[in-house]
Amino acid sequence: MERPEPAPGVRESQWRDSIEIMRNQLTVALLLFACALDGEDHKITAVRFAKLWDGEKVVDGALVVIDRGRIRSVLGGNPQPPAGAEVVDWSRYYGLPGLIDVHTHMTYYWDRAPGTLPRGQARMPAVTVFLAQENAKKTLQAGVTSVRDLGSTDYTDIAMRDLINLGAMTGPRMFVCGYGLSTTRGFRPGAGPVSSPGTADSPDEVMQAVRRQIAAGADVIKMYGSIGGFENVGTQQTFTYEEMKAAVEVSHTMGKRIAIHSYGPEGARDAVRAGADSLEHAVDIDDATLAEMARRGTYYVPTIDHNRYYADAAAEFQFRPGSIQGLNAYIARNLETARRAFKAGVKFAMGSDAVYTMFGQNTRELAWFVKIGMTPEQALKTATTNAADLLGAKQDLGWATTGHYADLVAVDGDPLADIQVAIDKVRGVIKGGAVLKLSQ
Ligand SMILES: [Zn+2]
């Protein structure tokens, strides 16, 4: 398009601004025209932000126009909202794309009833699904509009995902795995009874167990490649390299990604060599494995903060003496490993490993990421664009740009200057165009 010359006396920058505003108004007019043409009577929502970080860049005076759950346009320079649009005025706030937590256990629910402990509360699966709504709501209120849920029992995660997608339950979009795969060798963190649909003791059984989860409706596969979990910070590998390889091959053949849990370096090395899409938790990862992760694009989900949660909860959970020291020592190694991984160019995604009463604290992991040397923006990418990439959902999630799901978070302050703003100062959440009213 030919650009007209500025009128005499008008500064080039002002001229550019006014062209920008005209262009934006034209876009809004075209948008309304397009809506009128398709003859449907549907609601348009327009959200104002002081600034919007869209996953890559900052848009000043942003107006996000939402149509049928997706972002129709993002315009800068405070343009007028389309006539008839429902306006959400968050012009005091900074906007972000909906955040993504790639490691949760949404169906781990504890009501804190006197005389009970978090694990081992026997319930009907349907009761668990009903009660776990509380976890889902707390997660949304933290600005997390999508999760990858990595381990459940009785397929309660699949039930939650479906209820949320039907609009019958309030919660983040869930990408679920059914049962995490576990062996009968060693401790099985949260993986259900000794013999479950996730139990496998050979490459053949692993392949069957993967197929079983996918047949049940899993979106992603989870494998417990080592012991470790809860107050246990043991690192012993459980599944062999051959078993991991079998799991990766069948998952990928069936079009699914696989996350492998390993608390220690041996399981981490084998998980990476076997081709896992993400490695969960691991400490003391050797340099060759870090280089391999960077080369392959394997995501590291260190879940540093979950051991902080366990250390804080040690008394309430009646952990055995010495647990806090063990957890804190593990955190120090986790932090150091994450620092080395970041330096080595490994890609990160934010996973909280939230369970029980940790929901709502899902994004505290971001502060640890800043501690290892990320800028706040790099940290935010781990919970937006990187996480969307790990989920294989870059077209729908992770960016607040045209065509993506209208998942937005309003925060009070500048999250690119202070990551704590994104963690503690969430003031509004929109998921799929629906405005969630926060309690505060
Ligand atoms: Zn976990």
Image: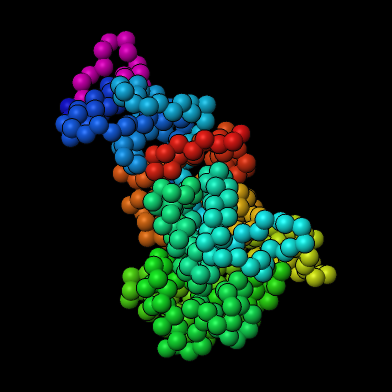
Quadrant position of residue 230? bottom right
Which residue is rendered at x = 69% and y = 72% of the image? 233
Q: Which residues are magenta?
A: 3-20
Work out which quarter of the rendered image holds the N terminus and state it. top left
Q: Position of residue 131 (x, y in %)?
A: 58, 55
- Image height check: is 304 above or below 61? below
Quadrant where the C terminus sits is top right
Q: Is residue 381 above or below residue 10?
A: below
Q: Residue at x 58, y 85 (%)?
A: 184
Q: Answer whether residue 195 is magenta in the image.
A: no
Q: Residue 14 versus residue 327: which sits nearer the camera?
A: 327
Looking at the image, residue 111 sits to the left or right of residue 45; the answer is right
Q: Is residue 412 left or right of residue 78?
A: right
> Looking at the image, is 49 positioned above or below residue 353?
above
| Quadrant in the rendering for residue 252 | bottom left
Q: Residue furthest top?
A: 9
Query: Is any atom of residue 128 visible in this view?
Result: yes
- Is 14 magenta? The answer is yes
Coordinates of residue 367 in the picture (x, y in percent):
63, 50
Along the viewing direction, whichever of 359 and 365 lies nearer the viewer: 359
Instruction: Tell me the residue at 57%/74% (across/down).
Output: 191
Q: Between residues 69 and 9, which one lies in front from this camera angle?
A: 69
Whether residue 285 appears in this view of the structure is no
Q: Position of residue 422 (x, y in %)?
A: 57, 42
What is the residue that sits farthest to the right in this orientation?
A: 321
Return the x and y of residue 236 as percentages of the image width and height: 64, 81
